[in-house]
Amino acid sequence: MSRRRDPLATHNERVRLFSGFINAVGLGFIGFAILRPLVELEAAIDGLFVFWALIGLALHGWAHYVLRYLEKGDQDDEL
């Protein structure tokens, strides 16, 4: 018995996985920006905090942008 791969579902899952990966990396950068001063016992917000936080926010925004490439199929094909 052969299985047929649904190209639309495959495409959408790849888009979701890529978006999730970018989001996880972005949240990692934001976490690093917050945790680094705490570990170094410096509570001040310096240039590196802003740098890592902006990179994280940019990646998080990019992940939301990537999700717009999800596609819808025809309603008649689902029956």
Image (spheres, grey):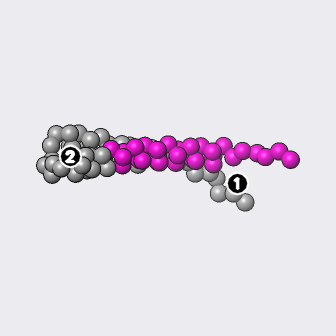
User: What is the three-letter code of the residue carrying label 1?
Assistant: Asp
Mark carried by residue 6: none
Which span is picked out in magenta? 1-29
Give the prevailing secondary structure in the magenta stretch.
Answer: helix
Displayed quadrant of residue 62: top left
- 40 sits to left or right of 18: left
In the shown orientation, is residue 3 left or right of residue 52? right
Name, please, the residue furthest toward the right: 1
* Residue 8 image offset from top left, x and y in percent: 63, 46
> Which residue lies under the disc numbered 1?
77
Identity of the residue drawn at 20% across and 43% down: 50
Q: Nearer the viewer, residue 38 or 13?
A: 38
Quarter of the image for the C terminus: give it.
bottom right
Between 50 and 70, the one lying in front of the other is 50
Q: Residues within 10 Å of mark 1 (few under 14, many from 20)?
A: few
Q: Nearer the viewer, residue 38 or 70?
A: 38
